[in-house]
Amino acid sequence: MMDDAFLPRTTRREFLRASGKALGFLALSQVAPSFVARAAAVGSPRPDKDSTILVLVQLAGGNDGLNTVIPYEDDRYYNLRPTLGIPKNEVLPLGDTVGLHPSCSEMHRLFSEGKLSVLQNVGYPNPNRSHFRSMEIWETASDSDDLGQTGWISRFFDNACEGAPSEDPEGIYLTKQAPQVFDSENFLNIYGASNQLSGSRGGDRGLLESFALTEGKETPEPAHFLSHTYLDALAMDERIGRILKNNQSASPYPNSRLAKSLDNVARMIRAGLDTRVYFVSLGGFDTHSNQEGRQAKLLSELSGALLAFQNDLESDGLDSQVTTMTFSEFGRRPLENESKGTDHGTAAPLFVMGSGVKTPIYGDAPSLDVPENGDLSHEIDFRSVYASVLENWLNCPSEPVLGRPFETLPIV
């Protein structure tokens, strides 16, 4: 194990997080050399090849759910949204009373084909409107008054199926920073592929190579330790690079950053990695002003990327193995503000996509009988969604992961 003197006034977890931020594409567990990680992984859960896969799509900034799944038959919606309300004749109907934003034509097609579920009014008790804290709650699956220390996905890895350790990452994220869903007190093989996506690997790579070149020299033990670490990171980076290059899709993707992320996820799935969870993100949903055009553009990017990803998986016969789920830290208030935007709110809809989804719409349209500048009330606890995915898709008991039992929903 690493000499504690090397990590003064910090914890291993803090060091892992700081290293991940500084080096970008350094896998979290790669901070420990592979021989340490493999030793720690003996007896730990292993992601099995051909097991089910979950792809998480973060809508960062707090997506306005009321203008995403629109209660177009409720007059109160138009009273609350005098300039932002989507005209009834433009809504893409999901039923008799609610419909999708007109920018979501591809998601509407997925819904019509039975490949997209809409979960209404997802949230939690005593909601927090801080971006940072709300995201922390969603990613740790904790109560709003509980500072969770580990991510719900990392706890899934700790409780998943048994087997021999794999060299493939258990989780892969395509974001600039490691998401908290992967925070763990144990060694987990998590890989950050953000620089593979952006192509800006030069600076990080040069830094890693300079550390790795300390190998073979007379160096203090911590530096020797790190040289192993950086060599591991470089090897993983080279391997993922080859996978992304050699497993190109025959299906077209839109020209957007989210589409590129999901294209790369599909390439890694096609390559047969044992990885069970992938994490991608689309930011910019914090629409306090001039929301109309901004949200329409973001929803169009989301919609086009989701359809392309699903089509890609289907073209390779991988769709039965993959479920995709969106989430955002909160919805927004029903009443539009004076800047033609919306402020931080609470409950919002959530989407689940895949060939295995079971229920087109779960839950009712939100009640808009709210006090002046009030919030929506949640109907579904987000941890019930997690419990459903854990038990019915990832085949993992949910209570050890979530800390207590939550109702499961017939969504997958």
Image: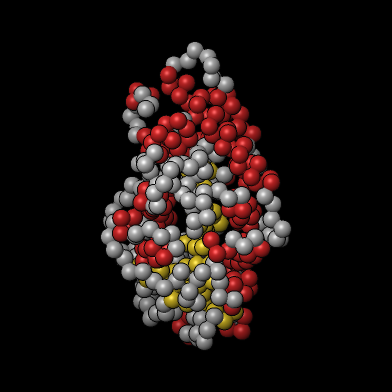
Left or right: where 309 falls relative to 325: right
Comparing 293 with 245, the one in front is 245
Q: Residue at x 59, y 78 (%)?
A: 112
- Image quarter of residue 185: top left
Confirm whether residue 258 shows in the render: yes
Depth check: 7 or 360 in front? 360
Q: Residue furthest top?
A: 218
- 45, above or below 121, in the image: above
Residue appearing at x 69%, y 46% in the figure: 246
| Image position, residue 204 (x, y; %) | 58, 33
Q: Residue furthest front?
A: 163
Q: Residue 359 at what x, y percent from top left?
A: 47, 76
Q: Is residue 311 left or right of residue 21?
A: right
Residue at image coords 32%, 50%: 148
Residue 340 point in image, percent of width and height: 54, 69
Residue 19 can be seen, yes or no = no
What colour scheme does the image use? secondary structure
**Quick check: 165 left or right of 241?**
left
- The quadrant where residue 405 appears: bottom left
Give x and y (percent) for residue 339.
52, 66
Marks counted in the figure total 0
**In what quadrant of the picture does the N terminus appear?**
top left
Question: In the figure, is residue 131 to the left or right of 55?
Answer: left
Seen in the picture, residue 58 relative to 190 is either above or below; the reply is: below
Q: Tell me what residue is drawn at x 53 percent, y 67 percent.
A: 353
